[in-house]
Image (cartoon, helix red, strand yellow):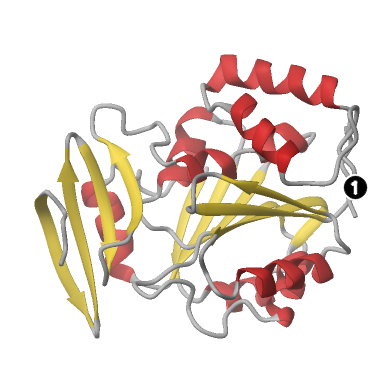
Amino acid sequence: MFRFGRKLHRAVAGEESVEVGEVDGVRSLYLGSSTIQSSMRVKTPYSLELPYSRAMMLFLLFSKRVQDVLVLGLGGGSVPKYIHYHLPDISTRVVELNPQVIAIARSHFYLPEDDERLQVIQGDGKQFLEDNPQTTDMLMLDIFDGQGIPPDLYAQDFFDTCRAALKLEGMMAVNLWGSDRNFDIYLQRIKQSFDSRVLVIPTGRPGNIVVFGLNRPLHETRWDMIRAKARELDTQYGLDFMGLLERLRDHNPNTPHRITME
């Protein structure tokens, strides 16, 4: 049974419903199930409510300069909206298959209309990647329906295509669910596509796990330097990068002084 609190919207497209509910000032999007797809605190609509969305922003910690972000899967648009509001030097493109999701992100989650720094494209994300190789600094995958990750999407050739879509210094972040029976399979495929240049960051228990794939090795691997930058970014953006960094250290190969990748 759905437990949405105050229900604000419900639409049905084919076999899948798109619903919006609100509890204690937090508005959430649901796609065909009671699993939260995206959340926004109504009083602070341009912050990131869910821990996994903050973890997706760790590219700020590891990349020298990101000018272009490509997101597959819109949901409520939390991350694109955050980037648009807080990071004016970055342009964002979002590809979303479901036109109702796009409409609801704008009507209920304050996603801005398209402008010179934001473009929302209704279409197939995989096809978009195939048609646009080497065009983004940061690729984010946040693709879920009511049953989880769409069947057969995260095949080996798909992650190969993801890497091919990146510029030379590019990175990919994938939002996965830790209890997904295919999690280990997806992780191994990402490692294969990115030559084992992979970082894993659990964001809750059992919860979401964000996996980063790097086109090139990290520019900085020393913990003291990474922590210093995390403190600086936390002061600037309030994203709890210091807490995420400890999770990263606990779940990836490292020495007392450095991150080490397999």
Can you say which quadrant of the picture contains the N terminus?
A: bottom left
91 in relation to 97, above or below? above
For the residue pair 178 and 65, the one nearer the viewer reads as: 178
At 19% across and 55% down in the image, what residue appears?
20
* Residue 50 position by quadrant: top left
Q: Amino acid at mark 1?
A: Pro
At 59% across and 73% down in the image, what residue appears?
128
Looking at the image, residue 114 sits to the left or right of residue 161; the answer is left
Image x and y of residue 37, in percent: 36, 57
The total of numbered circles placed on residues is 1
For the residue pair 78 and 31, the one nearer the viewer reads as: 31
Looking at the image, residue 217 sits to the left or right of residue 69; the answer is right
Circle 1 Cα neighbour tier, 10 Å, few/some/many (<14 / 14–19 / ≥20): some
Image x and y of residue 9, in percent: 13, 58
At 67% across and 70% down in the image, what residue appears?
184
Q: Is residue 175 visible?
A: yes
Which residue lies under the disc numbered 1? 217
* Residue 89 position by quadrant: top right
Image x and y of residue 186, in percent: 66, 71
Looking at the image, residue 226 sits to the left or right of residue 205; the answer is right
Can you say which quadrant of the picture contains the C terminus?
A: bottom right
Image x and y of residue 81, in percent: 43, 41
Secondary structure of the residue carrying tag 1 is loop
168 in relation to 11, above or below? above
* Residue 127 position by quadrant: bottom right
For the residue pair 112 and 182, the one nearer the viewer reads as: 182
Looking at the image, residue 7 sits to the left or right of residue 63; the answer is left
